[in-house]
């Protein structure tokens, strides 16, 4: 079958050529990720810091628990980030949002995009860990499709502890995921959810680097303010400083 250039451009816009390297499963044709033997990283770093030339990549994994606009580019050009990401121990699949108030079609599309990028990166040689993402119980029929059983997965609790409704749905979704996928390991990014029982599944916790960064900046600001106060008391010229 001959495909004209106009149609090919449209197919590229939706990343349909990437499907040639992956198999799909389920009612919605979700790309299927392979179970990989992944050495767990010592730390997780946000994708928004991954492409910096001075970024340390040794024993570090890349996560996408950040605002969607900061990684939309990996959907637009997934092939562009293969080499930069190969420097790292592993990479989590993009965490495209599945908000409760999104239309169901949009949530399905975002899960599909996450799986497709992850499966494509696997086919290109990256070590990829599936990110669990869900909304309410109505999403459970598709949001875990394409993730291999008995594998290592990742999940975030960012923003969950401060929202009782979000915490309720997190608990429901996490329990469903454990029962369905029976993961060997869970990479837990963010604060622990009180009294949640992961059963026999090994949980590896990672701190929210953004929170830790803000704490560090707050401490630096406090020290800087004290230094400025001391300088002012001694009549010295005050410096102009800011965060990097």
Image (cartoon, helix red, strand yellow):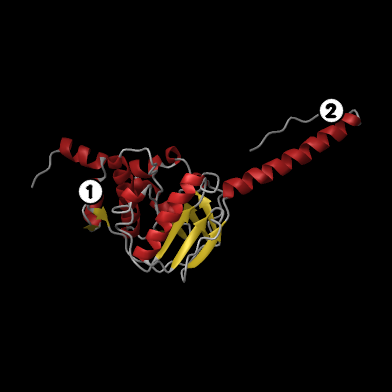
Q: Secondary structure at mark 2?
A: loop
User: Disc 1 to disc 2, how far (Cα)?
Assistant: 61 Å
Q: Which residue is mark 2?
A: 237
Q: Residue furthest bottom?
A: 200
Q: Residues within 10 Å of mark 2 (few under 14, many from 20)?
A: few
* Image location of residue 67, percent across then percent down: 46, 40
Judge left or right: residue 239 versus residue 52: right
Q: Quadrant of residue 215?
A: top right
Residue 191 seen in the current view: yes
Pick the residue in front: 31 or 98: 98
Which of the numbered marks, if any, corresponds to residue 17? 1
Asked whether the beta carbons under mark 1 and mark 2 sit within 8 Å of each other, the answer is: no
The total of numbered circles placed on residues is: 2
What residue is rendered at 50% in x and 51% in y?
A: 157
Please say if 76 is above or below 56: above
Q: Residues within 10 Å of mark 1 (few under 14, many from 20)?
A: few
Q: In the rendered structure, which disc, 1 or 2, sits on the residue that comes first in sequence?
A: 1
Q: Residue furthest left?
A: 1
What residue is rendered at 54% in x and 60% in y?
A: 195
What residue is rendered at 32% in x and 43% in y?
A: 107
């Amino acid at each position: 079958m001959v495909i004209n250039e106009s149609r090919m451009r449209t197919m590229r816009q939706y990343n349909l050529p990437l499907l040639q390297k992956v198999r799909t499963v389920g009612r919605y044709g979700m790309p299927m990720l392979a179970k990989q033997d992944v050495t767990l990283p010592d730390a997780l770093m946000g994708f928004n810091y991954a492409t910096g030339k001075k970024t340390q990549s040794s024993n570090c994994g890349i996560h996408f628990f950040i605002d969607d606009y900061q990684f939309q580019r990996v959907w637009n050009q997934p092939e562009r980030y293969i080499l930069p990401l190969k420097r790292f121990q592993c990479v989590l699949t993009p965490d495209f949002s599945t908000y409760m108030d999104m239309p169901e079609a949009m949530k399905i599309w975002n899960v599909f995009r996450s799986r497709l990028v992850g499966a494509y990166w696997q086919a290109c040689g990256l070590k990829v860990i599936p990110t669990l993402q869900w909304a309410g119980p109505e999403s459970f029929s598709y949001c875990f499709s394409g993730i291999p059983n008995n594998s290592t997965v990742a999940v975030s609790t960012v923003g969950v502890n401060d929202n009782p409704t979000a915490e309720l749905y997190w608990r429901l979704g996490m329990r469903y995921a454990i029962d369905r996928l029976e993961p060997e390991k869970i990479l837990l990014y963010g604060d622990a959810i009180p009294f949640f029982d992961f059963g026999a599944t090994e949980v590896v916790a990672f701190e929210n680097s953004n929170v830790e960064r803000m704490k560090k900046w707050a401490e630096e600001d406090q020290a800087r303010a004290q230094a400025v106060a001391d300088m002012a008391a001694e009549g010295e010229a005050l410096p102009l400083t800011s965060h990097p």
